[in-house]
Amino acid sequence: MGGSAFAERLSAEAFPRLPPVVYYALKAHLMLLLQQEYLYVGVPREDPQKPDHGDLDFIVTQPRDTDTTCVPNESIKALFGAFDVISGNPTTNYAVPVEDGEWEQYGLLELENSFRAKCADRKIYYQVSSTYMSVKVMKSGRLLARKNGLSFGLLGLKVEVAKRENYLRLSLSFEHILQFFGLSIDTYNAGFNCKDDIFRWLTTSKYFDPSLFQSDILAPRRPKREGGRLDAFIEFVARLQPNSTPTTMEGLEARKKRVVDEALTFFDKHQAYRDKWREYEEQQEARRRADEERAKVRKIWSGSRVNDWAEMNGYWSGVKKIMDVVRLQLGGDDAIVAIVNEQGEESVRTLVIQVRDQLGIVPRKPEELPPTTTPPA
């Protein structure tokens, strides 16, 4: 069951676990509502193999109303049609009623009623959470994380595995992420009067080191029209300690490796990281084998080979017709390669000639061929 945030107000049975079809429909509907209020709305990537879901988590930033820093929780409560709300900073939870018979459209009315039967008032709810993240905190925190070998943003704290775009999520909990960086959640909750207050707070992180930013500070600037303005946080660091010695590339890589290891320990993700690496290596090995097989196919079974076997003199449209029929008869390229490996190429060459004759394809003389033709694959 979900609903742990409402344990003192509603029973756990009032928050049933959601079948995937219900979960994804709810996510799509509520995301559209939140996008009316926020420019950026994110949802952590779900495990596609997960049989059901306990609750629905959103991360939001940058209200569309430029006169406010955060949409009031009561406004979101009304937007969702929520029965109850537990306000928090940065995460707020909403109990959104499941309308009577709502799951019938998914063919799950019987399941819905079975959940209602466990509640005295037959009322059940979706638990929906919304975590607000300041844009300036997100952007500057992203830079601090990147300098330490991590990735931070709307979808939490992640670590790269082997290559870009292949990440392991360490945590989605903003509070836990701040704990890891050694940043005060109380200071964050109290709010900031200006962006420099945010920057000063970030510099209290145990992973902040001004030398990490010196290469950015000292790099030649491009004209502003080409995007050459320094990031505001880097400008703040430049004012804070303008004469720091830049970290060497070797020192930076060693630091990133150390911080990543500390992050894996803090979030208890060492095994998940190893599993992710093994999955990546298995994928790479599978791609390597597939490439080898394709190369083997091209070497044994290609338009040029069939052209030679059938003496087609570069009549490539005829070669393609022959290859299509041979593929159909033998079961595809892989089967053809297997036959050549087991019986030798003579058996396939003989079949190629037979198919040529059955199709009534007559090799053309070179002068009869179109000037621009290429072998078929």
Image: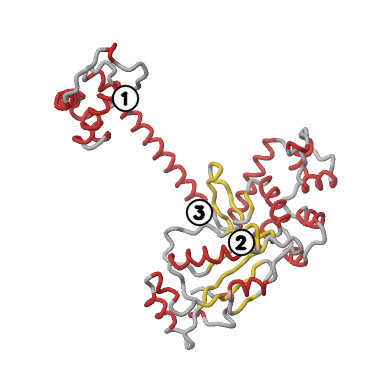
**Where residue 34 sits: x, y (%)?**
61, 64
The numbered mark, 1 or 3, whose residue comes first in the sequence reads 3
Residue found at x 67% / y 63%: 132
Mark toward the viewer: 1 or 2: 2
Mark 2–mark 3 Cα distance, whole angstroms, equals 33 Å
Instruction: Determine which of the numbered discs, if any, sits on residue 197 in the image.
Output: none
Mark 1–mark 2 Cα distance, whole angstroms, equals 54 Å
Nearest the viewer among 66 and 260 is 66
The residue labelled by disc 1 is: 299
The residue labelled by disc 3 is: 272
The numbered mark, 2 or 3, whose residue comes first in the sequence reads 2
- 81 with respect to 74 (left or right): left
The reply to whether discs 1 and 2 touch (Cβ–Cβ < 8 Å) is no
Which SS class for mark 1? helix
- 103 with respect to 311 (left or right): right
- Density class for disc 1 (Cα within 10 Å; few <14, some 14-19, many ≥20) is few
Q: Amino acid at mark 1?
A: Lys
Which SS class for mark 2? loop
The residue labelled by disc 2 is: 35
**Where residue 222 sits: x, y (%)?**
76, 34
Which SS class for mark 3? helix
